[in-house]
Image (spheres, rainbow, N blue to C red):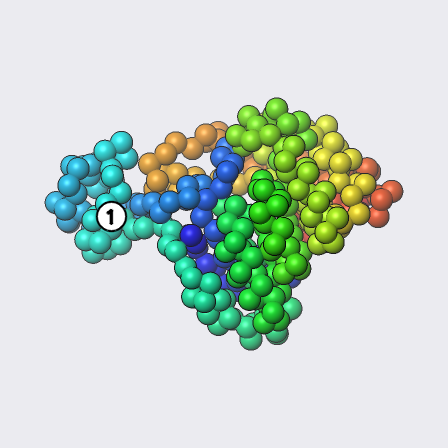
Amino acid sequence: MIFNIQKCSIHDGNGLRTLVFFKGCPMKCLWCANPESQSYKSEIMESQTRCIGCGACQKVCPESAITLGSDGFRIDRSLCKRCYKCTERCYSESKFVVGRDYSVEELFADIEKDRIFYSMSGGGVTFSGGEPLTHPTFLAEIAKKCHESGINVIVESCGYGIYDDFKKALPYIDSMFLDIKHIDSNIHKSLTGKGNELIFDNIKRIAEFGIPITVRTPVVPGYNDSPENIIGISEFISIIPGIVEYELLPYHNLGEAKYKSLGIPYALKDVSSPSDEEMRKLVEYSNQTLQDYGKKCFFVKDNKKEIIT
């Protein structure tokens, strides 16, 4: 199941890219910017800025789960059975479904539309999520079709999947972004719902397969932004030959509105983005470890890599 396809992105790989977001993830990161990616099932999101207050959704709801509030008609998620009648009736698309099933052929046709931009810019397709590694058969089939058609394939992943299941996709992947949220497994579990042992094992095995890896860490103040954590991750990746670089991603709360759209609370309301100076300091700590191994840590500022040694 796919929940979004983003065209002409300049992030998550070289050149202009099509980002394909798989729906469903085994982790529940506290800061997740795409909460609609977490469930493996389709869901209803609400955009109150689109609501025109007509009440048509309320009239067709068989569970009486929709009531009028201060910002328009809202779904009581404890009553909703996801029959989707409200989304079918909503004239303004204030209530809409996220997540739909694609065939490999349908998805490839959508990806291939931008082939001219890939060839002009050195771009391609990036499969993200959610977690694409937990859709191993579909990932292998679509990656193979893209690879054999000359389209560059990147996978962005939290690394939490069953290697024997997703390894069939590896021959068709050109490079990967793999996340490490915390070096301490117990803290990792408290932040994401899962420990990091399987992730570390997968990173090692993917690197041994020969796929170039960029490791990423989202830097969330008060949760995983300690120098000890960044240095610990740097020490882990320093001796793995297949890891080519380490990127630190500053936390942002741009996905907060999506939580309200799904009727779920946002856990990090009072957390601010780290300052540029804080990011530069962490990059410096990392590079003090990595420089002897020919690797670099960086963060991106204004679409440029900031590398501090």
Q: Decide: is 59 above or below 233.
A: below
Determine if residue 77 is in view. Answer: yes
Mark 1 lies on residue: 84
Going by the image, does 64 lie left or right of 184? left
Secondary structure found at label 1: loop
Across and down, in percent, residue 153 comes to: 61, 61
Q: Residue furthest right?
A: 292
Mark 1 surroundings within 10 Å by alpha-carbon count, few (fewer than 14), some (14 through 19), many (20 or more):
some
Q: Which residue appears at 43% of the width and 54% of the height?
A: 2
Across and down, in percent, residue 21 comes to: 48, 53
Q: Residue furthest front?
A: 164
Determine if residue 16 is in view. Answer: no
Classify residue 261 by image quadrant. top left
Going by the image, does 219 lie left or right of 22? right
Q: Decide: is 17 above or below 238.
A: below
Q: Which residue appears at 35% of the width and 47% of the height?
A: 42
Dot 1 amino acid type: Tyr
- The front one of 279 and 33 is 33
Going by the image, does 136 lie left or right of 294? left
Q: Which residue appears at 66% of the width and 42% of the height?
A: 202
Q: Which residue appears at 57% of the width and 66% of the height?
A: 146
Quadrant the C terminus occupies: top right
